[in-house]
Image (spheres, grey):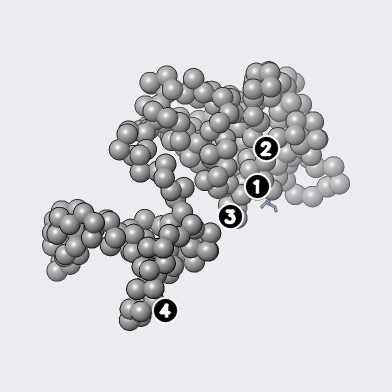
Amino acid sequence: MRRYDILSLFPGFFQGPLSESILKRAQQRGIVQITVHDLRSYAHDRHAIVDDRPYGGGAGMVLKPEPIIEAVTSLRQGQETHLVLLTPQGRPFKQAIAQELVEHQHLLCVCGRYEGFDERVRDLLAPDEISIGDYVLTGGELPALVLLDAVIRLIPGVLGDEDSARYDSFVDALLDFPHYTRPQSIQGLGVPDVLLSGDHERIRRWRRKEALRRTKVRRPDLLQQAFLSKEDLDLLGEIEGEQGAS
Ligand code: 9D3
């Protein structure tokens, strides 16, 4: 069983997300154990103070190093523990990092708050520092949930067979093709004929083409990195030849 520990000043943040759907099921089935720890319980002074004013002055508070070092030392399991610090200065989270992290049996995710960590936490604990993107949040709690959601769904047995099979061939290289379900007509909008044809080879080719079209229009950066087959290049040629393809 893989273990995921979360260290946070706001343990209540996690109760909802961990008690729903796939993350809940993974815990119930004993595939993962997720435990949330209150950073404040590792502060031993009378008022359980976890933050303090920055040396050199300036706005905001800095997380004191001792509670974090104590908590990490206490929660660490030998060499097995991979320590993740969620901070805006971390390496940008990607699917490739989720695939890397799922190989660890024990992750300890430490969520920052206020202006962040005392620099000596980095010096002493050499954490894997991760950011989830270039926008400003109020702390590392939502990033920890994002990271764990992305990692846990990769564990064999967590998703249903139908879900998981779809993902092992491609590492989400392209954007998804358009999906349709019933009704066949809504407010005058129908469903592409090819999807009603029953011709599985035509459907497969159409879906691949529309995935390529979307990726080209919305995420040309992804198309640059994608491994494209001869068929993909043919389909992109067709798209190029169409009106308004640009
Ligand atoms: C406005 C304060 N910022 C001054 C440059 C620093 C700052 C400190 C702490 C900004 C945000 C935060 C809280 N964010 C996180 O702890 C965080 C985060 C994020 O904000 N965006 C993306 N990924 C992450 S991971 C942790």
Residue shown at the point (74%, 26%) measured from the top left: 69
Residue 31 seen from this side: yes
Q: Could you tell me if the residues under marks 4 and 2 are in contact, i.e. CB atoms within 8 Å?
A: no
Q: Could you tell me if the residues under marks 4 and 3 are in contact, i.e. CB atoms within 8 Å?
A: no
Query: Reading the chain from its start, which is encountered first: label 4 or label 1?
Result: 1
Query: Reading the chain from its start, which is encountered first: label 3 or label 1?
Result: 1
Disc 4: which residue: 246
Query: Reading the chain from its start, which is encountered first: label 3 or label 2?
Result: 2
Q: Residues within 10 Å of mark 1 (few under 14, many from 20)?
A: some
- Left-right relation of 221 to 108: left
Q: Nearer the viewer, mark 4 or mark 3?
A: 4
Disc 2: which residue: 128
Q: Nearer the viewer, mark 4 or mark 2?
A: 4
Q: What distance separates the C-alpha of mark 4 from that of mark 1?
A: 34 Å
- Left-right relation of 24 to 131: left
Q: Secondary structure at mark 4?
A: loop
Residue in the foreground of this view, choosing between 42 and 230:
230
> Farthest residue in the bottom direction?
243
Kindly identify the amino acid type of the residue bearing the numbered disc 3: Tyr
Q: Residues within 10 Å of mark 2 (few under 14, many from 20)?
A: some
Disc 3: which residue: 135
Answer with the quarter of the image where residue 164 lies: top left
Query: Reading the chain from its start, which is encountered first: label 4 or label 3?
Result: 3
Q: Could you tell me if the residues under marks 2 and 1 are in contact, i.e. CB atoms within 8 Å?
A: yes
Kindly identify the amino acid type of the residue bearing the numbered disc 4: Ser
